[in-house]
Image (cartoon, grey):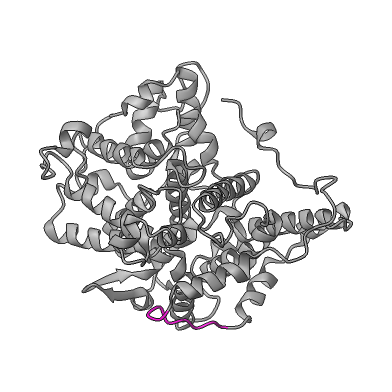
C-alpha cells in the first residue's frame, strides 16, 4: 500500500540490534542534522546506505512508522525490550508518498537500482557519497532551504537528483575522460562528460521504469521490479520533474562553479537587502514570492529553480564543512580515488598527470586549505545569505576544520602550534567577521556561456597546486583536534 507499513527486504536481513541502531539513525530529526554520520550508517545497514537514507527521506513518515512498528515501538515510545525511544512530532517537508501516489516498494526498487549502478570499488564516488549528498541536501532544506521551493514537486525533483547525480561514475574524472579520448568523451563532445552521462543514465532508467521493454528484449521490471516513481504523476508534472532533475545533475559539473556562484551572488544581492533573509512579513517560513522569482531561469524552454540547483551543488562540495572525523575521512577517500587515477595515467603515458592526481607531489594540507578558502567557504558564506541558519550551524564547523588543516601545515613545517591559543581562538571565533570578509572580497563576474575547461584548470591550479618547496620536516605530532576514525566510531 502507498502509505502502508512496508519495509525493504534489506531491513529484515538485519539483526534486531542492528535494526534498533539503524532506526535511531533514520529518524527525521536525526537525518536533518548537519553532523549526520552517513559513513557510520553505511557500515550499520550492510553497505546499502543509499537505499536506507533514500527510503527514510523520500518515504517519510511511512518509513519511520514501518520501522517503529517492526521494532514494537508503542505510542508512548517504548520499545518491546523496555527501552524508551523519543517519538517525533515535527513538521515534515512533504509526504511525497501520498502527494505523488508512490508505492513504497516502487520507491525502494528505484533506490536499489540506483545504488547498484554505483561502483563499490570507487573509494569516493560510490553509493555512500550519493547517500551523503542526499542527506546533506536534505539538511540544507530543513535548515531553511525548503522555503525556496515553490511546490512539493520541486523538492522531490531536487532530492531525486541528489540520489542520481553520480550514478555510473567510473572513478575517473572528466579530465581523464577527455585526455584518454574515452568513448564517453566522444559521445558527449568533451563537454561535462560525466555529468551528461549521469543525467542520461538516470533519465533512461526513469523512461524504462516499470515493465516497459528496453528495445533489446529485456524488461526493466522483470529484473528489478516496478521502479517507476513517476507513474501516477500527471504528464505536466513528469515533464517539470525531468527538466529540474536533469538540469540539477548537469549543474554539478565543477567547471560551472564560478559561474554558479557569481550568478547566485547577483540574484541574492538584488534582493531585499544584503545579509538579510527575504522573508514574507506574514509567514516566517516562506520566502517572499516576488523575491523568489529572481531565482528562476528559463532553460530548455522551462523555468528552472536555480536556488535548488545551487543547494545541490553546495551539498556536493560540502565534505570539508562536516564535523570530525567525517571531513578527514572524506578527504582521504577523495585523494585515494584521484591518486588511483594518476597511477593509471602514468601507466597509459597520459602526461602530465591531471591536477590533484600525482600522489608524489600533492600536499594534503595545502589541498584542503586551498579548497576550503577558494571553493567551499565562499559557497557557504553565500549560502548563509539565503539560509541564515548556515551562519550558526555550518560556518563555525568549516572554520574549525580550516584551522585544523592550517595547524597540520604548521606542524609539517616545524612551526609551533600553541594549543592554548588555538583553543581560545576556537571558542572566540567570530563567524560574522568571516562572513563580512568574504562579502567585501573581490566580486568575480563569470559568464557561464563563456566558461570553459581552461577556467576549470586555472581554478584547480590556483586552489589545489602544491607549493614548489616541499616540506623539510616530517610530522612529529598531531595538532589538537586530529581525529582517528577507528577510535571514535560508534560500536555497531
Q: What is the quadrant of residue 463 in the picture?
A: bottom right
Q: Which residues are magenta?
A: 443-450
Q: Residue drawn at (51%, 81%), measured in percent from left and top?
A: 273
Q: Percent from the top left, x then y, of residue 323?
A: 63, 48
Q: Residue drawn at (54%, 56%), measured in percent from left and top?
A: 318
Decide which of 288, 138 is in the foreground and name it. Answer: 138
Q: Residue drawn at (63%, 71%), measured in percent from left and top?
A: 435
Query: From what the image shows, is residue 126 above or below residue 365?
Result: above
Q: For the C terminus, give its image quadrant.
A: top right
Q: Percent from the top left, x then y, of residue 293?
A: 33, 76
Majority secondary structure of the magenta segment? loop
Judge whether residue 151 can be spotted in this image. Answer: no
Q: For the N terminus, give its image quadrant.
A: top left
Q: Is residue 290 magenta?
A: no
Q: Percent from the top left, x then y, of residue 252?
A: 41, 61
Decide which of 87, 385 is in the foreground and name it. Answer: 385
Judge whether residue 7 can be spotted in this image. Answer: yes
Query: From what the image shows, is residue 264 above or below residue 123?
Result: below
Q: Is residue 376 left or right of residue 16?
A: right
Q: Percent from the top left, x then y, of residue 347?
A: 52, 49
Decide which of 320, 15 is in the foreground and name it. Answer: 320
Q: Is residue 445 magenta?
A: yes
Q: Residue drawn at (51%, 17%), measured in percent from left and top?
A: 82
Amino acid at each position: 500500500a502507498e502509505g502502508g507499513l512496508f519495509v525493504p527486504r534489506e531491513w529484515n536481513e538485519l539483526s534486531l540490534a542492528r535494526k534498533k541502531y539503524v532506526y535511531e539513525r533514520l529518524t527525521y530529526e536525526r537525518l536533518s542534522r548537519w553532523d549526520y554520520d552517513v559513513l557510520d550508517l553505511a557500515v550499520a545497514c550492510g553497505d546499502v546506505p543509499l537505499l536506507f537514507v533514500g527510503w527514510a527521506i523520500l518515504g517519510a513518515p511511512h518509513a519511520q512508522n514501518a520501522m517503529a512498528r517492526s521494532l514494537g515501538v508503542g505510542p508512548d515510545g517504548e520499545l518491546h525490550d523496555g527501552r524508551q525511544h523519543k517519538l517525533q512530532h515535527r513538521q515534515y517537508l512533504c509526504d511525497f508518498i501520498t502527494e505523488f501516489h508512490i508505492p513504497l516498494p516502487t520507491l525502494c526498487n528505484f533506490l536499489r537500482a540506483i545504488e547498484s549502478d554505483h561502483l563499490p570499488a570507487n573509494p569516493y564516488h560510490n553509493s555512500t557519497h550519493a547517500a551523503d549528498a542526499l542527506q546533506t541536501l536534505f539538511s540544507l532544506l530543513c535548515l531553511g532551504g525548503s522555503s525556496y521551493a515553490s511546490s512539493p514537486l520541486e523538492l522531490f525533483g531536487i532530492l531525486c537528483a541528489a540520489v542520481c547525480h553520480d550514478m555510473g561514475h567510473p572513478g575517473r574524472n572528466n579530465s581523464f575522460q577527455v585526455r584518454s579520448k574515452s568513448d564517453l568523451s566522444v559521445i558527449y563532445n568533451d563537454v561535462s562528460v560525466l555529468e551528461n552521462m549521469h543525467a542520461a543514465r538516470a533519465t533512461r532508467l526513469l523512461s524504462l521504469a516499470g515493465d516497459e521493454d528496453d528495445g533489446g528484449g529485456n524488461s526493466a521490471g522483470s529484473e528489478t521490479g516496478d521502479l517507476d516513481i513517476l507513474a501516477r504523476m500527471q504528464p505536466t508534472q513528469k515533464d517539470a520533474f525531468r527538466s529540474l532533475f536533469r538540469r540539477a545533475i548537469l549543474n554539478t559539473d565543477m567547471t560551472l562553479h564560478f559561474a554558479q556562484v557569481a550568478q547566485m551572488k547577483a540574484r541574492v544581492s538584488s534582493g531585499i537587502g544584503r545579509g538579510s533573509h527575504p522573508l514574507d512579513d506574514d509567514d516566517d517560513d516562506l520566502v517572499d514570492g516576488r523575491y523568489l522569482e529572481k531565482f528562476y531561469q528559463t532553460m530548455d524552454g522551462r523555468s528552472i529553480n536555480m536556488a535548488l540547483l545551487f543547494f545541490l551543488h553546495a551539498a556536493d562540495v560540502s565534505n570539508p564543512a562536516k564535523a570530525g572525523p567525517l571531513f578527514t575521512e572524506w578527504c582521504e577517500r577523495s585523494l585515494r580515488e584521484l591518486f588511483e587515477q594518476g597511477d593509471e595515467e602514468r601507466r597509459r603515458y597520459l602526461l602530465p598527470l591531471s591536477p590533484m592526481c600525482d600522489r608524489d607531489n600533492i600536499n594534503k594540507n595545502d589541498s584542503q586549505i586551498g579548497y576550503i578558502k577558494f571553493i567551499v567557504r565562499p559557497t557557504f558564506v553565500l549560502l548563509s545569505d539565503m539560509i541564515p541558519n548556515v551562519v550558526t550551524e555550518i560556518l563555525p564547523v568549516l572554520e574549525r576544520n580550516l584551522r585544523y588543516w592550517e595547524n597540520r601545515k604548521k606542524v609539517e613545517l616545524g612551526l609551533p602550534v600553541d594549543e592554548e591559543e588555538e583553543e581560545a581562538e576556537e571558542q572566540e571565533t567570530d563567524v560574522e567577521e568571516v562572513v563580512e570578509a568574504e562579502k567585501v572580497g573581490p566580486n568575480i563576474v563569470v559568464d557561464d556561456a563563456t566558461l570553459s575547461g581552461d577556467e576549470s584548470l586555472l581554478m584547480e591550479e590556483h586552489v589545489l597546486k602544491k607549493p614548489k618547496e616541499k616540506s623539510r620536516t616530517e610530522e612529529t605530532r598531531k595538532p589538537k583536534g586530529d581525529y582517528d576514525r577507528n577510535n571514535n566510531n560508534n560500536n555497531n
